[in-house]
């Protein structure tokens, strides 16, 4: 668990997320929950509800905090890295991915990075 949480947080930090924002921690937890097989989709009825119960806040607060963290990363993060990771998922009107697009793409990128690491590890043995 510890290694997986650290890996997710390092990924978010690399993208420019700010660890002082509540949404950063919520997003890391949401991704962790999804990686461990718990259904989080649709976010509004599954993912946000789980986090709201865990953190003792409203579902709307969870959604807004995650939106704010994504917005802050898009304002302050490394544009090249963000577009490399999320270029095809950007909302044309807002210039950043929706919460759902972000979570799904992050899960996909983290899973493919794990596959690459597993392949390197197996090749070394």
Image (spheres, helix red, strand yellow):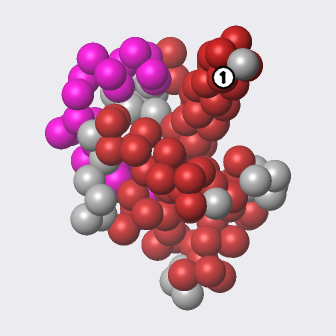
Is 29 displayed left or right of 122 in the figure?
left
- Can you name the residue that lies furthest to the bottom here? 56
> Residue at point 59% right, 33% down?
110
Where 43 falls versus 82 (above or below)? Answer: below
Where 15 falls versus 116 (above or below)? Answer: below
Numbered disc 1: secondary structure: helix
Q: Is residue 24 magenta?
A: no
From which residue to which does the magenta span run?
64-87
- Can you name the residue that lies furthest to the left here? 76
Where 53 falls versus 105 (above or below)? Answer: below
Q: Which residue is mark 1?
A: 121
> Residue at point 59% right, 51% down?
4
- Residue 40 in view, yes or no: yes
Locate residue 27, reporting x and y percent.
50, 56
User: In this view of the protein, which residue sits in the foreground, 41 or 11?
Assistant: 11
Classify residue 114 by image quadrant: top right
Locate residue 13, reporting x and y percent.
33, 44
Where 9 falls versus 2 (above or below)? Answer: above
Classify residue 55 by image quadrant: bottom right
Locate residue 56, reporting x and y percent.
55, 87
Is 13 displayed left or right of 47 in the figure?
left
């Amino acid at each position: 668990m510890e290694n997986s949480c650290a890996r997710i947080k390092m990924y978010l930090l690399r993208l420019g997320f700010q660890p002082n924002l509540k949404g950063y921690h919520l997003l890391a937890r949401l991704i962790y929950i999804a990686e461990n097989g718990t259904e989080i989709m649709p976010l509004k009825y599954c993912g946000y509800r789980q986090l709201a119960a865990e953190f003792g806040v409203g579902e709307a607060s969870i959604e807004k905090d995650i939106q704010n963290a994504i917005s802050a990363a898009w304002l302050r993060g490394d544009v090249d890295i963000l577009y490399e990771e999320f270029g095809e998922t950007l909302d044309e009107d807002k210039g950043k991915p929706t919460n759902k697009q972000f979570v799904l793409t992050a899960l996909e990128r983290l899973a493919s990075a794990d596959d690459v690491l597993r392949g390197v590890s197996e090749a070394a043995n």
